[in-house]
Image (cartoon, rainbow, N blue to C red):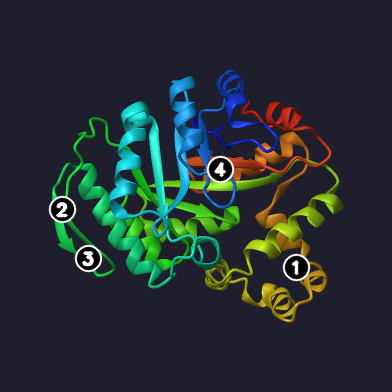
Amino acid sequence: MTSRYGITIPFDGVPLGEHRTWYSRLVDLGYTDVWSAEVDGADGFTPLALAAAWEPRLNLGLAVAPVFTRGPGLLAMTIAALAEVAGERLTIGLGASSQPVVERWNGITYERPFARTRDVLRFVNRALDGEKIDEDFPTFSVHGFKLSRPVVERPRILLGALRPAMLHLAGADADGAILNWLAAEDVATCRAEVGLDKAIAARLFVVPTADADLARAVGRRMISSYLTVNAYAEFHRWLGRGEALTPMWDAWAAGDRKLANAAIPDDVVDALIIHGSFDACRDHVQRYVEAGVSMPTIAIVPVGVTLEEAIVGLAPR
């Protein structure tokens, strides 16, 4: 198994204040990383701040902090504050997020996502290096900003990236890329765009059940929820799944959610959703590692097992 093996936090059904014992247990089970997200649950930073203070043996990651929902200065300050606690254990992912998250849920116009991501990435890198920034960027202006608390141990900055332009930016201006919703066979295609010398992280969705029909039913609902978002749809067209997923997109656009789910081929579900016995799931994760993912992070969907059983059963061997 890879030397890095992460799990997504916070755990559903577990209050944030009760994660302390879980964090220590994860290390004892062999997990090396905890990675948060920022969509519609906890924010991305609070679970990591707790982990940083409670369990110094864990590496910490965020996949991803949206570049639209915080001002550039506040984003730099938040990263710097967490780095003060976690230091080199910390990896921060920046990303464009999506129109529903940014516009519908946060009331912020989702315009020029590539340009905004590029500008925020460059600003954050310079701010963390201690530079005083007074500049009109193409998508925002910052005048006279400088972090007053210097960053002693600089965190790694990755970029959430899906298609060539963003993947190239991750290779050129970041420390690597964060991938999402892809098959193990897709990793080489993405890595070729980023560069072979860069870090690659990936969130991998795991439904640990040997009931293939049940796993596929759960997986289809997940796939139709995500891959109908334009950014992910274009990602999979680029990866070559346009023909396979067009029936799903057409049914979704027509408002027929049931037909959209039914239209997703089994082989697509099996490629994008890890399922099977615990051993089979670990073997599938290893395929991503062998393809070039250096920081795999599982996101457990506990079906037919408890969260604790899944965490123990999926722990690295």
| Image location (x, y in percent) of residue 226 | 63, 62
Identified by mark 1, the residue type is Ile
- Report x, y in % for residue 121: 30, 55
Give the residue type at disc 3: Phe
Q: Please tell me in which quadrant of the rendered image residue 312 appears.
A: top right
Q: Residue at position x 69%, y 44% from top?
A: 206
Label placed on residue 137: 3
User: Answer yes or no: do the residues labelled 3 and 4 have beta carbons within 8 Å?
Assistant: no
Report how far apart the C-alphas of labels 1 and 2 lie in the structure: 48 Å
Q: Nearer the viewer, residue 222 or 6?
A: 222
Residue for point 51% across, 34% down:
47
Give SS at disc 1: loop
Q: Which residue is mark 1?
A: 264
Distance between mark 4 and mark 1 Cα atoms: 30 Å
Would residue 313 be found to the left or right of residue 110 on screen? right
First-in-chain label (1 vs 2):
2
Q: Earlier in the sequence, mark 3 or mark 4?
A: 4
Disc 2 target residue:
133
Q: Reading the chain from its start, which is encountered first: label 3 or label 1?
A: 3
